[in-house]
Image (tube, rainbow, N blue to C red):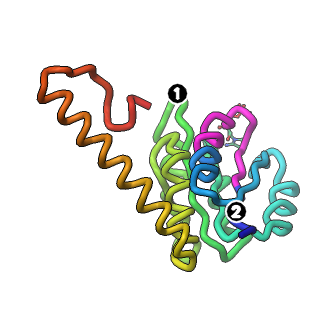
Amino acid sequence: MAPGVAIIMGSKSDLPIAERAAGVLRELGVPHTLTVASAHRTPDRLRATVEASDAEVFIAIAGLSAALPGAVAALTDRPVIGVPVSGKVNLDSILSIVQMPPGVPVAAVGLDRGDNAAILAAQIIAVRDGALLARLSQRRARAAEEVDRHAREVEAGGGGGGGADGGR
Ligand code: AIR
């Protein structure tokens, strides 16, 4: 089933977000690799990582001036999903990822949303993988059942709080 998804983070400090992505990919049975390479601190390592990878989709995770997803996109024609990482100023990483120049797109997910990056990467791969598409559909059905259960709890006066993503 390899090659799957290559997850690259700009720093080891991004690992909690990368682990969210890896957890979802594991659950969906999508092979993946995990590494650290910074667009600014280790550009040579980043180039070598991308050039050596046979991944179908890249997930690039970075905070601050988050050049990483764009730098990966500059090095490959395969799809790149950027995950901005939250910090003191959150718009910096979001805009660094969203504002790519014409011709070199990066798909952006929300702040710290490694989980959504993994789902999107799996959806891209699932275009040619019916079994993976079925697992994605089952995952979505389970999430819908959870909302139904929450609705019944709230309507019965249970409440309990927590947002749709558990407040994460
Ligand atoms: N970063 C690393 N190289 C370039 C950038 N923009 C990002 C990392 C991390 C943040 O800078 O992706 O989110 C802080 O890195 P560190 O290593 O200081 O914790």
Is 151 located above or below residue 44 in the figure? above
Q: Is residue 44 left or right of residue 64?
A: right
Under mark 1, the amino acid is Lys
Mark 1 and mark 2: Cα distance apart in space: 25 Å
Describe residue 17's horizontal placement relative to residue 133 as left or right.
right
Residue 128 at x, y = what percent?
56, 79
Give amino acid for label 2.
Val
Q: In which quarter of the image is the C terminus?
A: top left
Which residue in the structure is indicated by mark 1? 88
| Quadrant hosting ligand 1 | top right
Which residues lie in the magenta part? 7-20
Residue bearing the label numbered 2: 72
Q: Callout 1: 10 Å neighbours few (<14), some, many (20+)?
A: few
Residue 124 is labelled as none
Task: State whether residue 65 is above or below residue 4.
Answer: above
Q: What x and y, as percent, mark residue 97?
A: 54, 54
Answer whether labels 1 and 2 touch (C-beta < 8 Å): no
Q: Which one is in front, 48 or 135? A: 135
Q: Residues within 10 Å of mark 2 (few under 14, many from 20)?
A: many
Side of 142 relative to 88 (left or right): left
Q: Measured from the top left, where is residue 64 in percent x and y?
A: 60, 39
